[in-house]
């Protein structure tokens, strides 16, 4: 609906309310005073006003092109001016208390139709009021013919005074309402610009806050959250209730910091949180100030899980490099005398009786020397791996070869270990050294077998595509490990099994690093472990 249409409807509704108010008031007076006060003409007057309003309503609904024009507003206001003139005539003419309605009509015209409307209606009111003065001054029609009331014909002075005061009043009201309307229009325009700027700033603020990679939280002094962007809710909890308390949420997530109290901090503080789902959150909390007075808190929340894992990975790489360099030198120094010990034990054993105590001890020396030599060989392969011999191979074939070989293991043959495979139906090609990949996968399968309980379990080998990677996964139903121990297992000589040198996962880590991939371990204590090998797919299909 257009603006003029809305104003026309408001005029009709307002007129209906006024007419009904007069009608009900007349009924009340009639019932209270009785028929002595003959107010029947007022009923006719109100009927006329209602009839005019009905005519305006019909015209509004029938003539669509007419209702959105200023002439429709002018018609209504001029009709109202005539109605006010008639009401003034019936209530004493120049002495009527209802002549103030003329001024209200000018104000309404000025607000709706601006300057032209105000002066047009001021002119119409002047003509109608002048006609009323002439009728009363020349006594053409007397009000007491219609209403029982005391009536005296006005004198020339009273008539001139009434005419001049009202004409000047109409003009002054038109001038004032025009000035006010002009100022109001300018204020509306200015307000509109301010609202547009405010809306634009709010939109920009929303864009900035929603685009921030971290979370933003504001609270009152008690810690009740007044604002939290979507990232903050995602990091601190998707299903947080309305009016949740920031400090209570920190306690729930495991913070024992002094920030758990809403009375702190008075200065900017930092909190590091490790959540139950192994996310690492960093929070910077500062007082929210208004003119120097603290009104609440501002918290910036960042998820530093990837950064922490990267730092741990770099730290592990540095430790591995340092350990490897030192141990390689030691291994070379040990290997030569170890060979001499093993050779001397072998020669002495030949000169002793096979069943003697000396022969048994020399056999132990020889076996342990051989085992230690094998450990040193494995370690040297780890710290100084052979150069990669890259080929474009289908990792399904590599995985299938390891599965076939592991199927000959006695634990599988006895039915204690179940082998499951879920290899992709489509080719999973990657540029790798197949021998080293086979070694890495074999080490993982051996670790999974050792992690199974005495009554056995299941080992699953699967292959899938994920983004730019081909992922080879080994999952077992073994004992698992705490999350705090996962990263440590990549260090040399760290293991949880009674057998082995503890180089299996370390070699897997080194092999994947040399291929430009990575290894990830997902484990839950008591519920098994999954090791994931990420190989860059390159131009591989899928």
Image: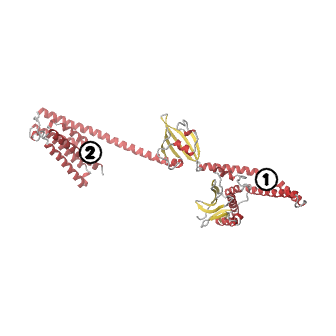
Q: Residue at x 13, y 34 (%)?
A: 159
Q: Nearer the viewer, residue 421 or 93?
A: 421
Q: Position of residue 147 (x, y in %)?
A: 11, 40
- Dot 2 falls on a residue whose secondary structure is helix
Q: Quadrant of residue 383?
A: bottom right
Q: Is residue 169 left or right of residue 298?
A: left
- The quarter in which the C terminus is drawn is bottom right
Q: Quadrant of residue 134?
A: top left
Whole-number angstrom distance, CA of label 2 to CA of label 1: 101 Å
Q: Is residue 136 visible?
A: yes
Q: Position of residue 267 (x, y in %)?
A: 55, 36
Q: Of discs 2 and 1, which sits in the foreground? A: 1
Q: Is residue 200 above or below residue 136?
A: below
Q: Is residue 339 visible?
A: no
Q: Is residue 43 left or right of residue 60?
A: left
- Indicate which disc, 2 or 1, sits on the residue closer to the N terminus: 2
- Dot 1 falls on a residue whose secondary structure is helix
Q: Position of residue 452 (x, y in %)?
A: 67, 58
Q: Nearer the viewer, residue 50 or 193?
A: 50
Q: Nearer the viewer, residue 73 or 486?
A: 486
Q: Position of residue 466 (x, y in %)?
A: 58, 60
Density class for disc 1 (Cα within 10 Å; few <14, some 14-19, many ≥20) is: some
Q: Which residue is mark 1?
A: 331
Density class for disc 2 (Cα within 10 Å; few <14, some 14-19, many ≥20) is: many
Q: Residue at x 69, y 49 (%)?
A: 318
Mark 2 vs 1: CB contact within 8 A? no
Q: Which residue is mark 2?
A: 113
Q: Quadrant of residue 36?
A: top left
Looking at the rendered structure, the number of numbered marks drawn on it comes to: 2
């Amino acid at each position: 609906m257009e603006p003029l249409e809305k104003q026309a409807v408001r005029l009709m509704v307002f007129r209906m309310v006024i007419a009904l108010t007069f009608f009900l008031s007349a009924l009340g007076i009639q019932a209270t005073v009785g028929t002595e006060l003959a107010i029947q003409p007022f009923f006719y007057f109100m009927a006329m006003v209602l009839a005019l309003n009905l005519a305006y309503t019909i015209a509004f609904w029938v003539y669509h092109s007419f209702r959105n024009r200023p002439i429709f507003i002018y018609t209504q206001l001029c009709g109202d001016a005539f109605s006010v003139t008639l009401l003034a005539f019936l209530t004493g003419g120049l002495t009527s208390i209802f002549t103030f309605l003329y001024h209200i009509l000018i104000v309404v015209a000025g607000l709706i139709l601006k300057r032209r409307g105000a002066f047009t209606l001021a002119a119409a009111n002047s003509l109608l009021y002048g006609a009323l003065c002439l009728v009363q001054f020349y006594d053409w029609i007397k009000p007491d013919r219609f209403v029982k009331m005391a009536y005296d014909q006005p004198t020339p002075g009273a008539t001139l005074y009434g005419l001049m005061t009202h004409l000047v009043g109409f003009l002054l009201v038109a001038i004032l309402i025009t000035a006010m309307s002009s100022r109001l229009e300018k204020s509306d325009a200015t307000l509109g610009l301010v609202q547009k700027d405010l809306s634009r700033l709010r939109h920009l603020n929303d864009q900035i806050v929603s685009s921030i990679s971290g979370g933003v939280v504001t609270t009152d002094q008690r810690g009740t959250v007044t604002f939290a962007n979507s990232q903050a809710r995602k990091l601190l909890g998707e299903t947080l209730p309305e009016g949740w308390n920031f400090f209570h949420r920190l306690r729930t997530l495991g913070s024992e910091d002094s920030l758990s109290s809403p009375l702190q901090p008075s200065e900017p503080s930092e909190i590091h949180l490790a959540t139950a789902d192994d996310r690492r959150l960093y929070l910077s909390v500062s007082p929210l100030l208004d003119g120097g007075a603290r009104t609440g808190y501002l918290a910036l929340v960042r998820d530093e899980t990837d950064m922490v894992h990267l730092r741990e990975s770099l730290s592990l790489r540095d430790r591995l490099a340092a350990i490897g360099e030192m141990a390689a030198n030691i291994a070379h120094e040990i290997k030569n005398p170890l060979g001499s010990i093993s050779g001397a034990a072998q020669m002495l054993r030949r000169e002793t009786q096979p069943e003697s105590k000396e022969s048994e001890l020399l056999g132990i020396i020889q076996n342990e020397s051989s085992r230690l030599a094998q450990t040193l060989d494995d370690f040297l392969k780890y710290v100084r791996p052979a150069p990669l011999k890259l080929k474009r191979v289908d990792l399904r074939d590599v995985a299938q070869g390891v599965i076939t070989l592991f199927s000959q293991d006695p634990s599988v043959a006895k039915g204690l270990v179940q082998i499951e495979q879920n290899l992709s139906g489509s080719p999973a090609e990657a540029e790798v050294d197949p021998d080293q990949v086979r070694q890495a996968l074999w080490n993982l399968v051996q670790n999974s077998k050792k992690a199974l309980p005495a009554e056995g379990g299941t080992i699953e080998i699967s292959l899938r595509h994920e983004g730019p990677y081909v992922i080879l996964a080994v999952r077992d139903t073994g004992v698992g490990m705490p999350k705090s121990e996962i990263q440590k297992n990549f260090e040399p000589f760290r293991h949880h099994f009674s057998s082995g040198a503890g180089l299996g996962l370390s070699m897997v880590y080194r092999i994947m690093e040399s291929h430009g991939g990575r290894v990830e371990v997902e484990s839950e204590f008591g519920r098994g472990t999954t090791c994931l090998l990420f190989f860059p797919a390159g131009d591989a299909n899928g």
